[in-house]
């Protein structure tokens, strides 16, 4: 049995694996994998140590589950986009403000705007302050995500898988034209895969993974 812990800026997730099956106990978002841990993924950016560990773990899981090239969209405190090549290399990505940050900024900076539930209001043209804000937050996020994926596809090629994870993944995926898969356990799966890669040969099938091509995050 394996306990995996994903500690993020907003929430934490604990997962228990029995083989390849898991049960989640509470919370959600981001992990901590230290430099030097075997991931099996070359990190082809200027400074690999600057890439958040959760982004590498998500990339490892997405490539294992869905193949490459692929784009991982993680809806957390920030919305991150990560590009993985057909060979399973981490190519880089994008960081944008998350829905929660955007919502709180409106509430904190505009005296007459309330806190609102982030949801699809059903139509763009709102008829009151709450639905005005919900339309801006929800459709703004959907269109930003789809617009960014369109740009990423121009660089990666059109034949690319798009996987979403994180707090608002299911919500935004419903309105997205490009997100194909929603995987709430992506980070925990990545943690399990990386744990397996770092076990002695007699304890895990993945221990004899190919050597890293470049310094890892």
Image (spheres, rainbow, N blue to C red):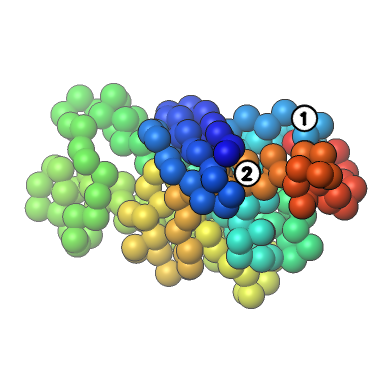
Decide: few, some or many residues near mark 1? Use Cα within 10 Å; few <14, some 14-19, many ≥20. few
Q: Which residue is mark 1?
A: 35
N-term-proximal mark, 2 vs 1? 1
Decide: few, some or many residues near mark 2? Use Cα within 10 Å; few <14, some 14-19, many ≥20. many
Residue 145 position within the rendered picture, expressed as x and y whole percent measured from the top left: 46, 56
Q: Nearer the viewer, residue 162 or 152?
A: 162
Is residue 81 visible in the rendered image? The answer is: no
Residue 194 position within the rendered picture, expressed as x and y whole percent measured from the top left: 70, 43
Residue drawn at (16%, 49%), measured in percent from left and top?
Answer: 131
Q: Nearer the viewer, residue 135 or 82?
A: 82
Element class at badge 1: loop
| Image quarter of the C terminus | top right
Residue 178 position within the rendered picture, expressed as x and y whole percent measured from the top left: 48, 67
Residue drawn at (39%, 60%), measured in percent from left and top?
Answer: 173
Residue drawn at (48%, 33%), measured in percent from left and top?
Answer: 14
Does 47 sit above or below residue 145? above
129 relative to 97 in the view: left or right: left
On residue 192, the disc is 2
Q: Residue 56 occupies which quadrant of the picture? A: top right
207 relative to 51 in the view: left or right: right
65 relative to 115 in the view: left or right: right
Does 41 sit above or below residue 102? below
Element class at badge 2: helix
Q: Nearer the viewer, residue 92 or 16?
A: 16
27 relative to 134 in the view: left or right: right
């Amino acid at each position: 049995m394996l306990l995996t812990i994903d500690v993020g800026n907003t929430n934490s997730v604990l997962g228990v694996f029995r083989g390849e099956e898991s049960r989640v106990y509470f919370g959600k978002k981001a992990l901590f994998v230290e430099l030097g841990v075997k991931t099996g993924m070359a990190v082809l950016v200027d400074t690999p140590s600057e890439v958040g560990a959760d982004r590498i773990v998500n990339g490892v899981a997405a490539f294992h589950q869905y193949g490459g090239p692929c784009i991982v969209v993680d809806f957390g405190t920030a919305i991150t986009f990560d590009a993985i090549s057909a060979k399973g290399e981490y190519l880089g990505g994008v960081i944008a403000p998350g829905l929660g940050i955007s919502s709180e900024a409106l509430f904190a900076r505009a005296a007459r705007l309330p806190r609102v539930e982030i949801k699809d209001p059903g139509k763009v043209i709102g008829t009151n302050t709450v639905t005005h804000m919900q339309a801006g937050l929800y459709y703004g996020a959907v269109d930003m995500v789809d617009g960014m994926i369109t740009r990423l596809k121009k660089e990666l090629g059109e034949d690319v898988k798009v996987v979403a994870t994180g707090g608002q993944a299911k919500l935004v995926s419903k309105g997205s034209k490009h997100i194909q898969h929603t995987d709430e356990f992506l980070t925990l799966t990545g943690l399990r895969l990386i744990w397996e890669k770092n076990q002695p040969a007699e304890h895990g099938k993945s221990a004899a993974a190919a050597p890293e091509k470049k310094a890892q995050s």
